[in-house]
Amino acid sequence: MSADKLSKNGAIWEKKKVLREIYHNFYERIAEFLTSGVTLEIGGGTGNLKEYAPNVISSDIIDSPWLDCVFDAQSIPFQDNSISNIVAVDVLHHIEFPIRFFNEANRVLMNGGRIILLEPAITPVSYPFYHFIHEEDVILSQNPLLDGTPDPTREPFDANQAIPTLIFNKYKKDFANLFPELSVVEKRYMSLFAYPLSGGFQKWCLVPSFLVKPLLRFEGFVESWIGRIFGFRIFLVIEKITIRP
């Protein structure tokens, strides 16, 4: 089932120029915040980050020919202080126990290393779409920082799209207390119009390809003012800092 969904998404990616343009914009933004050194891409299902950054190790929980390794983000098979960047696009809201991912990310990151996340944002405008139309759940009552034992029978694409918004809004103080070394240095609400009109990885699309680039440029100008209301995505850069006694 999971492999079928990955294959379906890959086919839509190849056919949908509008979607590729939007993700090109996403990856360019991500590349701006990368520090020098090795970058670990988690959830690299389509394997696109390598086109935008050097020294990328691409991984996912489901095997694909273009991946370098396969593992669960709740248990990262790299040595302590060995990675400069961790990039995850649409991954956090699929992780059963996000606290385990952040523990592992904190462990493998070098001082000054960064976690860069691009995730669904639950805002007044996006909520009806994600809750009533999108196939993945939106559970605002969940405590996203609880720990537990991962369920080995859980499907990799099971999700709660509210997890990123909950962690970095309602539970941001809890996150800061749990991970004092992980400082949020960038937080943006983005994807105001082009992304929702594109239909994402659905077959339908309501925006013509010639309008995508101008629309993305316009979004870049206004997202800091209206992103918290209209944004469909949250972009986060979290830096590992040295805690001095």
Image: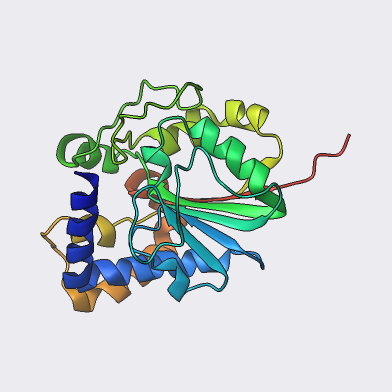
Depth check: 73 or 240 in front?
Answer: 73
| Outermost bottom residue | 210
Question: Would residue 219 appear left or right of 82 to someone viewing this image?
Answer: left
Question: Would residue 187 appear left or right of 51 to someone viewing this image?
Answer: right
Observer able to see residue 76 = yes
Q: Position of residue 52 (x, y in %)?
A: 47, 74
Observer able to see residue 188 = no
**Is 78 located above or below residue 217 in the figure?**
above
Q: Position of residue 179 (x, y in %)?
A: 66, 34
Depth check: 187 or 218 in front?
Answer: 187
* Quadrant of the frame with the N terminus: top left
| Outermost left residue | 204
The residue located at (35%, 39%) in the rendering is: 122
Residue 152, picture quadrant: top left
Count of numbered badges drawn on the protein: 0
Q: Position of residue 43 (x, y in %)?
A: 40, 52
* Quadrant of the frame with the C terminus: top right
**Is 234 located above or below residue 136 in the figure?**
below
The residue located at (39%, 22%) in the rendering is: 142
**Is 71 located above or below residue 55 in the figure?**
above
State the scheme by which the image is colored: rainbow
Q: Position of residue 115 (x, y in %)?
A: 57, 51
The residue located at (62%, 54%) in the rendering is: 114
